[in-house]
Amino acid sequence: MAIGLENQAFSDTLVILGAAGLVIPAFARFRISPVIGFILVGALVGPSGLGRLVNGAPWLYYLTISNPHAIEPFAEFGIVLLLFSIGLELSFRRLWAMRAQVFGTGAAELFGSAALIALGLNLLGQEWPGAVGLGLALALSSTALVLPLAGTAGAVGRSAFAMLLFEDLALVPIIFALGAMAPNAGGGWGEVAGVALRGGLTVTALYVAGRLTLPRLFAQAARTKSPELFLAASLLVVIVASLATTAAGLSPIVGALLAGLLIAETEYHSEVEVITAPFKGLALGVFLISVGMSVDFGSVAANWPSLLAAVAGVVAVKTVVTFLLLRVADMRPGVAAETGLLMGSPSETTLIVLATAAQAGLIQGPTAAFWQTVTAIGLTITPLLARLGNLAARRIEARGGAADDAQGVEPGRSVVIGLGRVGRLVADMLREHGQPFVAVEGDIDAAKAARAEGYPVLFGDAARPQLLERMDLASCRALILTMDDPVLTVRLTRAARAAAPDLPIIARARDERHAAELYRAGVTDAVPETLESSLQLSEAVLVDLGVAMGPVIASIHEKRDRLRQGIRESASLDREPRIRRLRGRSEAAG
């Protein structure tokens, strides 16, 4: 039977897919987070946007989402898949290492913010039970928005993830606690203890079962060489784990995170991550659209002074609490400020806690509606807070130059900027050949870890102009730039060449075009990583296909010479760029 456009589900699906197809490319072109785009699309196509005009212009029905509640299950599934993908990037060892941040800083952030917000609301006339319920609701932050903006690799992302993880674990106990605070509640605290016991047993059972069955399950799926079966197995694991934790009284996202952690311990985690990524992105887009649709422009226009004051108050309290706690935990001021602003707005789970507080009779209906609007506005401005936090962090770090310990480099050493996978390999080779060097790393945690492994590494942000000024490059033997940031590499090359005209500068280039740009900026040698890996791959393919080694090597040299000539012409060099010249010498010598 044919499905017509009048079908509500079909029409809403077309709007969502059309939004995804337009928003992501358009906002990526302008280097704006698609998170903002999805939220704006939701506000536009929702009942407070174009949906208001459907009665007067029926054709707008095909451009709007007529029933926002119909897409809520897909939005919740997006959050589940987000936590699953985060679990894939982690490990139980790393999670155990974060236990102090999760149950220390995370707990202090949640309950500290809740206490201050509750105190402020009580001073404004709200009864204590309602003030406590509102404080706990508004103290929560959005996992679905914060983690895509911050990631989990950097210091900001790790700090935010630790606090968000505690909030997700605390969500269900908070809901039961509010129910226990209801005027006519009975036995509520016993229910909280029961949930904690059932949740612990369920998580333990899932862990044991996952360690025993998941390797075998994915091994069988891999043997079939069927992507569909592999995807089905992945989604089955996520859904079963989420249902199990939900049945135990915990949040489904706890089960999704656990499923990701279990698969991360297997050899199939990379394939699972790749194959589920499109579903996660689309489902998360649905969630963001639902956030935009929850903004009621009429209510905002009628109460904007109160709403503005409420949003500003909540963001200010949570930002200050988070900043102070991270500073106590010895985080850099810039990281603490950026994390604080990122965690400042309420969460999608705030809406759940507000509904629970209203149902328990702790707050009145109009009060719940007001704070729901505050939550919707807060979620909408989260990407803007993230941008503001990033700018604030840069300004704080620029003023607090003493935070860097790269105050100077001992004369006669080479300097390796960036200690990622490329930088570590360069450092290993320098150390193996007895060449003195010092590395500079901008991630404080990575710098500490490398220092513990015996690398001579200093902490410093290469993006700051003051860094090179303090390093006295003229007394260094060489500068090696290994960062995977083409723009920053060119900028550092220009600054280093201006500071030290005779300094050998060797830089990692992304491709031949980037290499030419680096040569124009003053680099001594640029190594295009994609070019060399492609040539080596071509060489291996031809040899394995049975082509004689001599002609293969000759053709590779010829291709390299043509590329070298292209770089020379593009960069207007008066000499030939050195691309793998050492290899040619060694082969000639052999």
Image: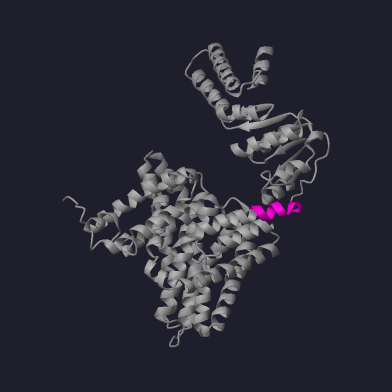
Reply yes or no: does residue 118 show up in magenta.
no
The percent coordinates of residue 387 (x first, y second) are 55, 54
Q: Residue at x 66, y 18 (%)?
A: 574
| Residue range of the region highlighted in magenta in the rendering | 394-403
Residue 296 appears in the figure = no
Q: Residue at x 24, y 58 (%)?
A: 8
Quadrant assignment, res 536:
top right
The percent coordinates of residue 142 (x first, y second) are 50, 62
Q: Quadrant of the C terminus?
A: top right
Q: Residue at x 41, y 56 (%)?
A: 40
- Taking depth in this image into account, of 175 and 364 the one nearest to the observer is 364
- Looking at the rendered structure, the number of numbered marks drawn on it comes to 0
The percent coordinates of residue 360 (x first, y second) are 42, 81
Quadrant assignment, res 238:
bottom left
The colour scheme is one colour
Residue 460 appears in the figure = yes
- Taking depth in this image into account, of 10 and 225 the one nearest to the observer is 10
Quadrant assignment, res 344:
bottom right
The percent coordinates of residue 195 (x first, y second) are 48, 73
Main secondary-structure element of the magenta-colored stretch: helix
